[in-house]
């Protein structure tokens, strides 16, 4: 994603300036052409030599240092940038840009660029929450600038609160999102389910399965990167919600069915990546079941609704995608599910294979289409498979 992309990293004068060094290093390792612009205050906290070494390019600090070149530099960087990231972004640089002040190399170049600009604010909590700063952020957001939320944690001022520089992975993901995509699903509404449902036995126990939700999240992420409006119906609160995705949390199959039905009518694509429990306890004990009360325990189970089958029955215009987790005869069972559940596409995987299935970050899948044509894929990361699935959905939608 970052290969040969021109990324301009603006470093303003916050203590987190040293963390931007890690970001620059990662971007370069991912193949990006990185150019750094530092404010004079940032250059007092971390030496420009650090950023020069890590980026492999000259670092620009003082716009008047090289008077014969400065205007060329700020315009050429502004024009060449595929993406601009200000990390860390102080209240000062946010305030300057929001109010049209361009009095140093960084603020001037931001003013001159037409590339997407991502601010990564990091500062003391009270500063971040100051209504003037928040007002500036809101103003910039409405003008099309992008912002990351700072994290909550220990701050340089020895307090705990909101204002921490986010984890590098999160910044990289946000940047990837902004850089990505050919907008293959621009304007499409995509509904994705993810994770394993949990059916309560009593207030402390449930029947669940090994699904981590990673595959559904990867598909949701890939769809958002292609410009879709994505609603993710998830059973897993632990995974970070991908950028641009709206998450709704559910616990059990009945709740998931309700939410899926609510959004189905209006969606263009529905993808059931969730591992839905086929059965639920007939009754849920209201109090914890105590072992003194029963020497042996029998839990009676009843069938859950087959959500995907229900969606297949009432399908009108939607492109409907199912998943199948099998341990043998993958393609035969998969084909049967395509027909039985009235699907346009099914992603089948053999969960017994090494590197496929639950709780790992890779998968080995076959895609089966409505006409029972099969495409087989080698082992790859769930994120890569998510991109392939979304690409195939877009390809089939465009043929309709
Ligand atoms: N599914 C569903 N509701 C259920 C069970 C499954 O919507 N109660 C969906 C899953 O989200 C998946 C597809 O149906 O997209 C296939 O799920 P899978 O567990 O592989 O198969 P089942 O249909 O449950 O059949 P079996 O467990 O007998 O293989």
Image: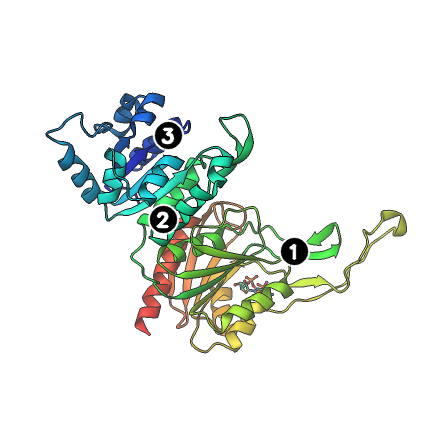
Tell me the CA gap for discs 1 and 2.
Answer: 42 Å
18 or 380, which is in the foreground? 18
Percent coordinates x, y for residue 331 in the rendering: 46, 63
Q: Is residue 319 above or below residue 166?
A: below
In this rendering, position of residue 15 left or right of residue 24: right
Asked if the residue at tag 1 contacts the one at tag 3, i.e. Cβ–Cβ closer than 8 Å, the answer is: no
User: What residue is drawn where x is 36% and y is 31%?
Assistant: 20
For marks 3 and 1, give the CA distance. Answer: 39 Å
Assess disc 1: are there few (<14), some (14-19) or many (≥20) residues with their C-alpha within 10 Å of its C-alpha.
Answer: many
> In the displayed image of the protein, which residue is found farthest to the left?
68
Q: Is residue 155 visible?
A: yes
Q: Tell me where residue 49 sits by quadrant.
A: top left
Q: Earlier in the sequence, mark 1 or mark 2?
A: 2
State the mark number for residue 22: 3
Which is more toward the observer, 201 or 147? 147
Q: Which residue is mark 1?
A: 198
Relative to 318, say whether 300 is above or below: above
Q: Which residue is mark 2?
A: 140
């Amino acid at each position: 994603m970052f290969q040969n992309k021109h990324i301009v990293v603006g470093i303003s004068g916050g203590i987190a300036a040293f963390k931007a060094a890690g970001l620059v290093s990662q971007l370069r390792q991912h193949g990006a052409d990185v150019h750094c612009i530092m404010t004079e205050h940032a250059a007092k906290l971390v030496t420009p030599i650090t950023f020069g070494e890590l980026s492999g390019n000259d670092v620009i600090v003082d716009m008047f240092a090289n008077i014969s070149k400065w205007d060329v530099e700020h315009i050429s960087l502004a024009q060449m940038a595929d993406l601009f990231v200000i990390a860390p972004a102080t209240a000062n640089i946010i305030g300057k840009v929001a109010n049209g002040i361009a009095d140093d190399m960084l603020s001037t170049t931001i003013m001159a660029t037409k590339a997407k600009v991502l601010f990564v604010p990091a500062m003391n909590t009270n500063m971040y929450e100051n209504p003037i700063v928040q007002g500036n952020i809101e103003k910039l957001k409405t003008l099309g600038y992008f912002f990351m939320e700072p994290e909550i944690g220990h701050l340089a001022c020895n307090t705990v609160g909101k204002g921490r520089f986010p984890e590098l992975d999160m910044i990289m993901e946000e940047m990837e999102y902004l850089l990505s995509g050919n907008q293959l699903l621009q304007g499409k509404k995509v509904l994705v389910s993810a994770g394993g449902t949990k059916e309560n036995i009593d207030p402390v126990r449930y029947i669940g399965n090994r699904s981590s939700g990673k595959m559904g999240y990867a598909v949701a992420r890939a769809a958002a990167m292609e410009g879709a409006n994505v609603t993710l119906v998830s059973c897993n609160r632990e995974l970070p919600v991908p950028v641009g995705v709206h998450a709704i949390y559910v616990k059990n199959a009945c709740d998931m069915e309700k939410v899926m039905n609510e959004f189905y009518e209006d969606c263009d694509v529905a993808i059931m990546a969730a591992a839905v429990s086929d059965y639920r306890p007939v009754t849920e004990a209201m109090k914890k079941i105590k072992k003194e009360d029963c020497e042996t325990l029998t839990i009676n189970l009843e069938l859950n609704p087959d959500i995907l089958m229900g969606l297949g029955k009432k399908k009108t215009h939607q492109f409907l995608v199912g998943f199948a987790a099998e341990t043998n005869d993958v393609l035969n069972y998969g084909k049967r599910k395509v027909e039985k559940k009235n699907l346009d596409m099914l992603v089948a995987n053999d969960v017994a294979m090494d590197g496929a299935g639950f709780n790992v970050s890779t998968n080995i899948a076959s895609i089966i289409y409505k006409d029972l044509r099969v495409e087989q894929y080698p082992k790859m990361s769930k994120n890569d498979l998510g991109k392939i699935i979304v690409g195939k959905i877009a390809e089939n939608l465009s043929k309709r």
